[in-house]
Every structure is written in C-alpha cells, then in structure tokens.
C-alpha cells in the first residue's frame, strides 16, 4: 500500500482496489491513524463527520464513524450530505475536537477524498497534517484490517446545528443589506432593528415593523441556482429563501455521476449548460453553481451578448467592494475597523487595490484555504477578519465557518447583484468601474497534465535559469519566504516600460496539490481592457514557449 499524503485540500484519489486508490480499507487505515492522534492530543476526544454526494461518500463516512467508535472516540455525523463549511461551523458550535469530511470537492466523479479539521474548524495545516500522515503511514495493511468495528457513541447531528448554521449566515447578510438602508426607514434610530438582527427567525417581521421593506420580503429578482447534484441543495436554497428570494433550483438531486458532467467544477463553462437553458426560459439575470461539497461557487451574469462567467478574482474584488460599501468601512464602523482581507499568492491584484483603497489590510498566503482559516484564528486583538478568498472560487465572510463557504458566498453574491440591479447595473458594470479607477487586472490559469517527473524538471530548470523579457524579480517559496511555510511554488514579477503594453505583470507556477497537473497563473495590470488582454496573451505565450510546454 502506497504512503498517504495530504495536499492543499486534504487527501484525494481515484476510487478502486489498486494500491493508492481510495477504498474502504484506505479510509479505515487513515481514520485509524487520525484516531491515534486524536487520543494523544489536548483537544476534546470527539469528532464531527460530514460527506458529500459522491459515489461511496456515505459508505466511507460510515467506515470512519465505526473506526473512530472502535477507539472509544465520540462521533457526530450528519444524516444527509451537507456542505463542508457546515461541518467547520458545527465543530465550533458544539465545541468538538476534530472533524472529517468525505469529499473530493470539484474533482471528477471517479475521485473521493478525506479532509481533516481541527477544533477551530480549520483544515489541518502542515505541521499537524504531517503528524497525522506519519501516524497513518505507521499503520500496516494488516493492522488496519484488524480493527474491530463496533458501533457505539455515534450520534447524528441535531437539526439545531444545521438551523444554527443557516441562521448565522442569514443574520450576517441581513446586517450588511440593511445597514445603509435603515436611514430611509420611518424610525431610523429605532433600536428594534438591532434587536431583529439578534433574532434571525423573527428578523423579517421585525424589519417590516420598523419600516424597512423590500429587504426580506418576497423578491422578484430572477435567478437560477444549480447544486450540480451536490450537497449545496441542502443549504443554499434555504438561505436564499430566508432572504426573500425565490431561486429556480436545478440539478438538486444527489447524484455521484453529477448528471453526466465530466467534472463538477464551477470554474468550467460547460457545467452551466442546463442552467443557461433554464435561465433563458425565465429571463433570469444571474446563475449560481456550487461544487459537490459546496465550498466553492461560480457566477454567470446576463449581458447583452448572453451569459458571461465571472472568474474568482473578479468576484473576490466585487465582494470586497460590496461589503466595504454596505458596512461603512470608510466611516470607521466599529464592525469593520481594523479589518483584514486575506487571499493567496496566486490571486489577482484588483482585490488588493480595492481593499487598500478602503483602508483594509491585505495579506497573501500560500494556496489552500486552510492557511486563511489558520490566519483568521490567530489574528491579533486589534485586527478583525473582514473577508477571505481564493481565485479558485472560494470565499468566506462572517464568523461562522473557518473554511471557504459557498453558502454564505452565494447569499452575498445574490444580494450584491440585487444591490446593483436596483441602480440599473450588473456586476460586470461595477467591475468595469473598479478597473477604471484602479487599472484593469486580468488573469488566466493554464493547467497542463504532465508527469510528476516532468513537473520537477520544469521547476528545476526555472530555478536554475530563466530569461523572460521584462523579468524583475523571482520569488521562490521552496525555502519558505515572507514568513510562509515552504512550498514548491515560483512567482515571477515583470515590470513594464515604454516598449511594453502593461504596467506590471506576474506569473506563478506550482504542482497541483490534488490532481496530476502543473498549474500556471498569469496576471497583468494595465490602463485599458484591450491593453491588458493583449498583454496577458503575450505574457502567457512567452512563458509557455520558455518552458517548452
């Protein structure tokens, strides 16, 4: 049996009976290794378990439950597929010591996986992941097979947990949605508004009673939501309906084949085909799609030319801007003073420019939302988490989960789209306004399916010599820089001059932590859209030519 290793999003692999595949025996062995760490840790000796709609996810979850139980560890498990961020929330809500989610996120249907969370609801980062990995790899195949699976002390999460998860999302969104509209109410200083925010289930009636209408009442804003046959079906519609929207929901039934999709990844335009058909039927203005474990969400908006897919950098910058506007950052609002936006070293520039323009701190970490979660729980007292995002469609706001959360992100995106729709604008219109102010920031991700040996050869060659025109600086994260853990990532910075089209540009290259791919990121910052677009193509083509791929 091959050694187990955790990537940027936990353990993932193709299901099957061959060495290195994900199967019952591997899940049992991994859980046994984790159980030994649980028993030797200072955290509570209990664990929460969630799973998505993939083939065997419910079976693997049961194996994990039984294995933990055999070690005398208390287990809580959801009785249906639930979003991964709901597990992160549940760990903190019930003060559990650990969490496990059976999922392979957005990978193709033949994959499954295993995410581990600590007592803070954060995916385990390098040091703890290595400790768990060592424990797993110390267990032989025969040892794993010999664990007696005796069901004891296994409980289902109460409905209260899922309700509390949805309540905190609704409360957070309501607070921002009404903050700047309360001055238009009949009694703008009425403290009943603030009381309503502490009473989520009664907030709708409370808001109406103080004269604030059109916020939580039935909303005609037409939108489509697709769960892509994943766990989002058990949370996203409920939240949107609580906020007064009536989304047309498609692809809600759990299906391990994801309706025949090659990959259930909301970054891929092909996953929106059915949603676009339905959107045209009802004249929808917005389409949302979440991945199988509902920690990532993609957005399409209606334009004069059809539906356009926004990328993660655009959505991230737009959400920073929207949250800053509706939470009065520029006015020193107590709820956002000392606010920190956290992103990654491969995310685009616009979000950083927007955040700093509002006086927010901006921090870049390694790829993997686990690092963002870890940073949040270690913020100093004079700083407060404001927003976190990755370019790969992962976003987080509020104080619920400590992992990327497509449920709260979906709610915020819909409210943001409505916010601009009232002004006669689309999200793309607002993105253009931001670019006109800060410069056009365009990015593209190029993934190459090549062997690990070839990946190592390419990165080694780049580290020894690189001669790309305009290169100003190379950041090598392998030794660990800027206070970050070691990572096999190179980031190259370019500076424009009179002969080049762009102001600044960058490229980054890293092996995927979850798939056999080499990922190459490119970004440019220019004064106009056309200039940025041309510059991006030149940069990408030149880089790929240099790498001979």
Image (cartoon, rainbow, N blue to C red):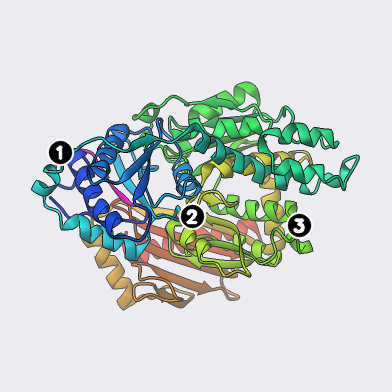
Describe residue 375's horizontal placement relative to residue 351 as left or right.
Answer: left
**SS label for mark 2:** strand
Could one spot residue 50 in this view of the protein? no
> Residue 17's mark?
1
Q: Main secondary structure of the magenta part?
A: loop
Q: Could you give the CA–CA distance between mark 2 and mark 1, rounded to whole angstroms?
A: 37 Å
Residue at (47% x, 26% y) in the render: 251
In this rendering, which labeled residue sits more in front, label 3 or label 2? 3
Span shown in magenta: 9-18
Mark 2 surroundings: few (<14), some (14-19) or many (≥20) residues within 10 A: some
> Residue 444's mark?
2
Q: Could you give the CA–CA distance between mark 3 and mark 2, rounded to whole angstroms?
A: 32 Å
- How far across and down, in percent of the image, does residue 38 sit? 30, 55
Mark 1 surroundings: few (<14), some (14-19) or many (≥20) residues within 10 A: few
Quarter in which the C terminus is drawn: bottom left
Q: Nearer the viewer, residue 244 or 318?
A: 244
Earlier residue among tags 2 and 1: 1
In this rendering, which labeled residue sits more in front, label 2 or label 1? 1
Residue placed furthest toward the top: 281
Q: Nearer the viewer, residue 349 or 192?
A: 192
Could one spot residue 262 in this view of the protein? yes
- How far across and down, in percent of the image, does residue 280 sit? 61, 25
Describe residue 326's horizontal placement relative to residue 97 as left or right.
Answer: right
Classify 278 as above or below 228: above
Q: Which residue is mark 3?
A: 328
**SS label for mark 3:** loop
Earlier residue among tags 3 and 2: 3
Earlier residue among tags 3 and 1: 1
Describe residue 76's horizontal placement relative to residue 39 as left or right.
Answer: right
Residue at (65% x, 32% y) in the render: 242
């Amino acid at each position: 049996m091959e050694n187990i290793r955790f990537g940027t999003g936990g353990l993932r692999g193709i299901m099957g009976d061959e060495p290195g595949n994900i199967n019952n025996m591997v899940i049992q062995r991994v859980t046994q290794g984790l159980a030994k760490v649980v028993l030797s840790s200072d955290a509570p000796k209990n664990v929460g378990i969630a799973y998505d709609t993939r083939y065997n996810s419910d079976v693997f979850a049961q194996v994990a439950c039984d294995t933990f139980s055999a070690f005398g560890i208390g287990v809580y498990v959801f009785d249906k597929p639930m979003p991964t961020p709901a597990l992160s929330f549940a760990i903190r809500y019930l003060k559990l010591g650990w969490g496990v989610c059976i999922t392979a996120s957005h990978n193709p249907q033949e994959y499954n996986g295993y995410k581990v969370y600590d007592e803070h609801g954060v995916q385990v980062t390098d040091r703890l992941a290595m400790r768990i990995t060592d424990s797993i790899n110390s267990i032989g195949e025969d040892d794993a097979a010999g664990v007696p699976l005796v069901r004891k002390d296994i409980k289902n999460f109460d409905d209260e947990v899922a309700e509390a998860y949805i309540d905190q999302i609704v409360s957070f969104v309501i607070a921002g949605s009404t903050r700047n509209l309360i001055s238009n109410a009949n009694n703008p200083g009425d403290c009943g508004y603030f009381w309503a925010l502490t009473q989520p289930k009664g907030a709708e009636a409370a808001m109406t009673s103080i004269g604030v209408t059109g916020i939580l009442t039935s909303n005609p804003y037409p939108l489509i939501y697709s769960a892509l046959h994943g766990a989002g079906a058990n949370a996203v519609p409920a939240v949107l309906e609580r906020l007064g929207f009536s989304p047309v929901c498609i692809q809600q039934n759990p299906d391990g084949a994801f309706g025949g999709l090659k990959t259930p990844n909301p970054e891929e335009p092909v996953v929106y085909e059915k949603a676009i058909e339905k959107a045209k039927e009802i004249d929808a203005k917005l389409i949302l799609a979440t991945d199988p474990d509902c920690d990532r969400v993609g957005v399409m908006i209606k334009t004069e030319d059809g539906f356009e897919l926004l990328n993660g950098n655009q959505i991230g910058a737009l959400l920073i801007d929207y949250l800053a506007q509706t939470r009065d950052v520029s006015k020193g609002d107590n709820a956002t003073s000392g606010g920190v936006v956290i992103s990654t070293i491969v995310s685009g520039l616009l979000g950083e420019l927007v955040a700093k323009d509002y006086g927010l701190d901006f921090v870049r970490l390694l790829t993997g939302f686990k690092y963002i979660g870890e940073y949040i729980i270690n913020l100093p007292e004079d700083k407060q988490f404001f927003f976190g995002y990755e370019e790969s469609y992962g976003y987080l706001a509020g104080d619920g989960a400590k992992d990327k959360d497509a449920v709260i992100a979906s709610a915020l995106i819909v409210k943001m789209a409505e916010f601009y729709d009232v002004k006669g604008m689309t999200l793309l219109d607002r993105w253009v306004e931001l670019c006109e102010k800060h410069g056009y920031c365009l990015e593209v991700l190029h993934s190459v399916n090549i062997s690990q040996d070839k990946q190592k050869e390419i990165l080694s060659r780049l580290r020894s010599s690189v001669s790309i025109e305009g290169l100003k600086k190379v950041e090598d994260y392998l030794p660990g820089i800027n206070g970050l853990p070691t990572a096999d990532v190179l980031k190259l910075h370019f500076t424009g001059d009179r002969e080049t089209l762009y102001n600044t540009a960058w490229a980054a290259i890293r092996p995927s932590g979850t798939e056999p791919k080499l990922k190459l990121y490119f970004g440019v910052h220019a004064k106009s859209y056309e200039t940025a677009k041309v510059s991006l193509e030149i940069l990408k083509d030149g880089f790929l030519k240099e790498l001979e791929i």
